[in-house]
Amino acid sequence: MKLRFTLNGRPVELETPSDRRVVDLLREDLGLTGVKEGCGQGECGACTILVDGVSRLSCLMLAAQLTGSSITTIEGLAARGRLHPVQEAFVQQGAVQCGFCTPGMVLAAVDLLGRDPQPRREEIRDGLSGNLCRCTGYQKIVDAVEQAAQPPQPEEEP
Amino acid sequence: MTAVLLPSGLEELWALWEQHPTAMPYAGGTDLLVRLRKGLAQAPALICLERLKELQCIEERGPELFLGALCTHQELLEHPLLRGRLPVLAQALAVLGSPPIRHMGTLGGNLATASPAGDTLPPLYVLGAEVELCSPAGVRRLSLTDFIRGPGQVTLGPREIVGGVWVAPPSDSVRQHFEKVGLRKALAIAVVSLAALIDLTPQGVVRGARLAWGSLGPTVVRSPRAEQALLGGRLRLPELRAAADIVADEAAPIDDLRATAAYRREVAGNLLLRLAQYGGG
Ligand SMILES: Cc1cc2nc3c(=O)[nH]c(=O)nc-3n(C[C@H](O)[C@H](O)[C@H](O)COP(=O)(O)OP(=O)(O)OC[C@H]3O[C@@H](n4cnc5c(N)ncnc54)[C@H](O)[C@@H]3O)c2cc1C
Ligand code: FES
Ligand code: FES
């Protein structure tokens, strides 16, 4: 099929089998290897992408489902060479070890903060509960999301 | 290669299905795409229903609510009508899978899967929900009991889909409760779950009780005897324990890799004890 969608802000048009898994299309055909495949069955979150701003699993989507939508992968999160605040916080808090889960974690956190800009720690844990990390023990990841969710500094009284 | 079709409305769906009569429908794909990949299902062609505009609404229609089959679990969960009027269903959706599974999986998919552990089923049973089915011939309504015939078995004619669910919200005197016991907090298939609607008089006496358990049998399990036992009493531990004993005694769950039958039996009863929180002392 001829497939048209927006990928990290740029329009894309390509020819692909309509049943190609989105994770394979992104990784193998388009070279976006920040999208990881862990379990291939919805359990680990490594393949998370944003579809029209909502976190979804690219291992459980087929190419046809991308038609007309806007996709963000980890490669598209930094705007004009500046890391996204969630990425910045991951770096500062040391929330990355092997890095395999990181793209999915960051995108899940971006979705979470979009819904709830100031989640409590418990809510951060819930929001990231579809993403598994085998290295960090999660503490630093939760710390990072907490940092990224810092309330804006209160305005000075004039 | 399997053709994947993506209709954006019902008219287009029926036309595409006419051209591809053997195509299998799916919605969020969180169940079917896993089974296809494992070789547990085969599909000569697929029709993805996730863009069917008509079936994504959540609306009050007369005394009932209509929940479109193509609403994702997340869309339902975030809707004020659901939180306000059907908290028993909202509580179940809040612990279904994980955030991305809730962003993709749909109500219609959960019903059509008819898993013994399907988290929306116990709440929909106690609510007395009806399922709306759509086909080119029109629309029909079935009770949930007539729709779900066994594990993984539902009443669907050729080229018929689940269009949505009709529910009449209980009155304000009814306490709505759901709890699921799993092996971990997220991404946990239920070991046992309980949905309960308890109608209390202003004095706190039970005048109506509807109970349904998930993962306790091949489909949702009801216990008219336990419901009967609660009537006329209060939500206190001795009364609840008596009802719990009935359930533990009646239930015939299975052993599987998640839990033994004996454990399920005990938890099924014990889940009732939580209702003491609505007893006011
Ligand atoms: C990691 C993981 C965790 C999960 N955890 C849970 C859990 O905690 N609780 C739970 O209940 N489920 C769980 N599930 C199962 C699944 O996510 C849910 O059952 C979900 O609601 C299925 O919806 P779907 O739209 O994705 O279904 P699909 O996979 O799209 O479809 C499933 C079946 O239903 C049919 N179907 C779908 N929509 C319709 C329709 N409108 N009309 C007719 N037939 C239709 C399809 O033909 C297919 O046979 C989990 C799945 C995964 C992968
Ligand atoms: S690879 Fe998609 S959830 Fe694990
Ligand atoms: S950093 Fe290695 S899996 Fe999370």
Image: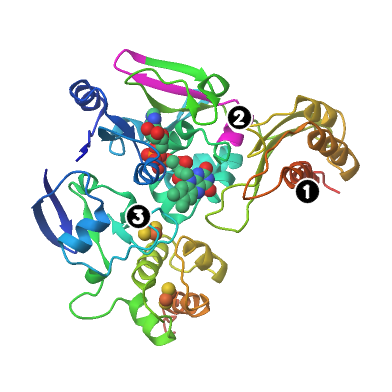
Amino acid type, residue under disc 1 in the picture: Gln
Q: Is residue B79 visible?
A: no
The residue nearer to you, when weighing B83 against A76, is A76
Q: Which residue is most to the front?
A: B39
Q: Quadrant of the N terminus of chain A?
A: top left
User: Split into 4 quadrants, where in the image is the C terminus of chain A?
Assistant: bottom left
Q: Which residue is mark 1?
A: B277
- Where is A63 relative to A34, above or below? above
Residue A47 position within the rendered picture, expressed as x and y whole percent measured from the top left: 33, 61
In the displayed image of the protein, which residue is found farthest to the top? B137
Q: Nearer the viewer, residue B70 or B281?
A: B70
The magenta-colored residue range is: B121-138
Q: Position of residue B129 (x, y in %)?
A: 55, 26
First-in-chain label (2 vs 1): 2
- Residue at x 30%, y 76% (from the top left corner): A84
Query: Mark 2 — on which chain does it sit?
Result: B
Q: Residue at label 3?
A: A56
- From mark 1 to mark 3, how far is it between C-alphas? 37 Å
Quarter where residue B90 is shown: top right
Q: How many marks?
A: 3
Q: Which residue is mark 2?
A: B125
